[in-house]
Amino acid sequence: MQEYFVDLHVHIGRSSSGMITKRGTANNLTFGNIAYEAHHRKGIQVIGVVDCVSPWIIKDIEELLDAGELEEVPGGGMVYSDNLVILLGSEIETREKHGCSAHSLMFFPSLSIVKEYSRIMDNHMTNLEYNATVSRLTGQELFDIADSLGGIFIPAHVFTPYKGMYGNCADRLIDIFNLSSFEKIPSIELGLSADTDMASQISELDTKTFLSNSDAHSLGRMGREYNIMLLDSLCFDEVVKALRNQDGRRITANYGLDPKLGKYYRTFCKKCENITELSPPVLECPNNPKHGIVMGVLDRLVMIRDREEPPGDNNRPPYHYQVPLQFIPGLGPKTIDRLIDAFGNEMNILHKASREQIGGIVSESITDMIVGAREGALSFSHGGGGKYGRVKNKG
Ligand SMILES: [Zn+2]
Ligand SMILES: [Zn+2]
């Protein structure tokens, strides 16, 4: 078995014909470009694309198959070049009690099943092509559809205030799913503003693995969070085994942002435009409780957790903090290109290249920050209310 880089939450913004399938995404975020970027610039070996409910995306995939650029793997998934497998998936919004809504990810082994899934979802969504997210289903109903098709179901960015199940809908997943369905859910996605230690404070998650995915809406942001998985080969079945901790397949490490950099880490007052620095939980604006707020992930977690410390026998893989190159102050796209040309891909720069090697290309202060990020030596201003946290320049 071998370790692979895995990012299971990447959005496709456009079909190759230029049709918009996901608003708020970059123009060049097509299936073909994602595959190229993941393989050649990011060094990722498994990516999950999550807009495959759209007939336009399905058409793109069929064309790439016809052209011989993609090939279906017997164990599920699509191989692109030798060393990249693409899992076909979908992120869908469901409506729960009290009118709240949340996102979940699903992945399916083959294109024929994705087509069947897309046909079924046409009954539960308006505008399947353009706005391929919002459904009229509950989480339980969506789970049942995914499960009946042999897919896997993963609640997405579970703590985020707008569309996360814990962030916005329920104190416990078991309030959303029946017990047998809950038990079949292999994993939850942490989201950019949470890490393993934070999520471990909810004991119902003890049987779930944790995913750190990028939720990329642009090529550059792919891989800003990812997982390392120990797999026997690159295919859907192997990834599912790793998510379920089966037969020695497993997640061996999570790499993600320091949660403080995430967009929703702390509570934000929309009126005062202030990200709180008071000790959590901050559940209202300290200046005026009538002001509208965006709840912070940390604040919400402190409110709903059922323990403060993870259990001692917790066999969780390590969660390594990383600061993607885009977050380094003073490091522009041209210099990032030069670094990638020199070291092959971003993962090599963040985790492998030596101080001397990096220093040969960029200034000493930027070298300090790239290397400092590995050692947890950087300080950050906290994110909140949709604004990313920032790396503080030293000195
Ligand atoms: Zn989402
Ligand atoms: Zn306020």
Image (cartoon, helix red, strand yellow):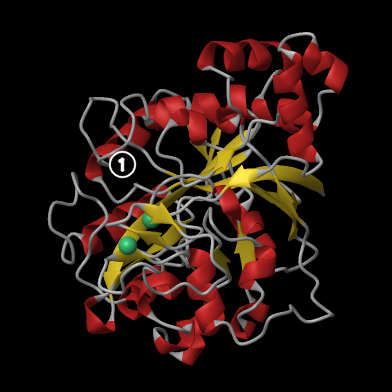
For this orientation, the residue located farthest to the front is 287
Q: How many marks?
A: 1
Determine which residue is flagged by label 1.
Answer: 58
Q: Is residue 64 above or below residue 174?
A: above
Residue 81 visible in image: no
Q: Which residue is located at x 67 percent, y 23 percent? A: 345
Q: Which residue is located at x 73 percent, y 9 percent? A: 361
Q: Is residue 299 above or below residue 105?
A: below
Q: Is residue 248 above or below residue 345?
A: below
**Front position in the image: 134 or 121:** 134
For this orientation, the residue located farthest to the left is 126
Image quarter where the C terminus lies is top right
Quarter containing ligand 2? Answer: bottom left
- Left or right: residue 114 versus residue 361 is left
Q: Residues within 10 Å of mark 1 (few under 14, many from 20)?
A: many
Residue 29 visible in image: yes
- Kind of residue sitting beneath label 1: Ile
Q: Position of residue 198 (x, y in %)?
A: 64, 69
- Left or right: residue 351 versus residue 28 is right
